[in-house]
Amino acid sequence: MRCHYCEWRCELGMDRFGVCKMYYSDGEAIRERFPRRWCSFGVIGIEAIPFYHVYPGSRCMTIGTSSCNFHCRYCANAFIAKRDPAEMQDELLDLTPTDMVKTARKLGCHHIVFNVNEPAVSMDSLRELAREAQNAGVTMGCLTNGYTTPESTEILASLFSFFNISLKGLSPEFNREYIGIPSVEPVLRTIRQLAAIRHVEVATPVIQGVNDHELDEMAGLIAAIDPEIPWHVFRLLPEDEMRDTPYPNIVSVNSLLEPARGKLANVYFHNFVGSEWVNTLCPSCGSVAIERFSLGCGGDKLQRFLCPGARCSSCGHTIRLLGDRVAWNDGGGAQ
Ligand code: SF4
């Protein structure tokens, strides 16, 4: 039986677990090898994940499972994503969907966000969790590498209300050498498919001298889908197989982003302390609509929310947001 969850479309059997090693087939269905096994849960602000246009200021419980269907040379979560999942099961948390949602509620979280590895490798567990979360009025979001098939992208859209999709690079050479996939086309297709029906933000980790020359072309591709998709350009701090690679120069990368700012309404450049490019500016008058502070490395915070009702307080232009500002301590579930 062939797995349809991502574009590897692996042939599965009782002892054939696919590229991600997370599924098998008993001849009747695709089954998870390690259902309801979670590698972490933590609590962070939504800006730190990052989502900049979703319920600003809200509190998220973040979760993950194990393994991945990509093999990124610079992976920051290699200790989870690249290990054989069978070898790490003793280290994982065994929590039912009910327990997960109750925990999120007790921690005062408005959302549950899957952000450690790739959701496509744990589809059934996430389906169960999403059902429980929907019943409890807790919204779910995820980070994804976007390598899903059209049919599994539809499944993801039924589980999650908001997505941050990673667009890592465009050329076949880059994708083969640095990511381990033959083509970026499925990722672009997923961005197109999800942006039509769900809130989507896109993130691109920049490696200077490797994919920075593609930034303008990426901006054009995103703008052709929807110029209001927020784009997070990340100064990559390479890890794993690329830990000796120098960090990108902030001034050089930022100068490459100037043309992109004429194509997309919201181009953010962050993952370093004190970034000047983390505020949302009104696309009409240029006033600051949402002010943030960046502590770098997933430490972005909301400072001031200046567009109540998603209207620029200077000119009244609509700022694209999924949900209004949420107080960190209100303890309720955002719908
Ligand atoms: S989800 Fe895993 S098993 Fe399924 S096609 Fe992708 S890599 Fe293969």
Image (spheres, helix red, strand yellow):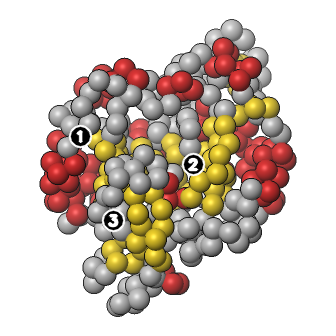
- Discs 1/2, front: 1
Query: Where does label 3 land, which residue?
Result: 266
- Above or below, comparing residue 177 to residue 128 in the picture: above
Residue 56 at x, y percent in the picture = 53, 68
The amino acid marked with disc number 3 is: Asn
Q: Earlier in the sequence, mark 3 or mark 1?
A: 1
Q: Which mark is residue 248?
A: 1
Q: Which mark is residue 123?
A: none
Query: Where does label 2 land, which residue?
Result: 142
- The one nearer the camera, 106 or 324, is 106
The image quadrant where one finds the C terminus is: bottom right
Residue 249 at x, y percent in the picture = 20, 43
Q: Earlier in the sequence, mark 2 or mark 3?
A: 2
The amino acid marked with disc number 2 is: Cys
> What residue is shown at x 35% (from left), y 53% (from top)?
273
Secondary element at image label 2: strand
Residue 5 at x, y percent in the picture = 59, 33
- Above or below, comparing residue 292 to residue 209 in the picture: below
The answer to whether the residues at label 1 and label 2 have Cβ atoms under 8 Å apart is no
- Discs 3/1, front: 1
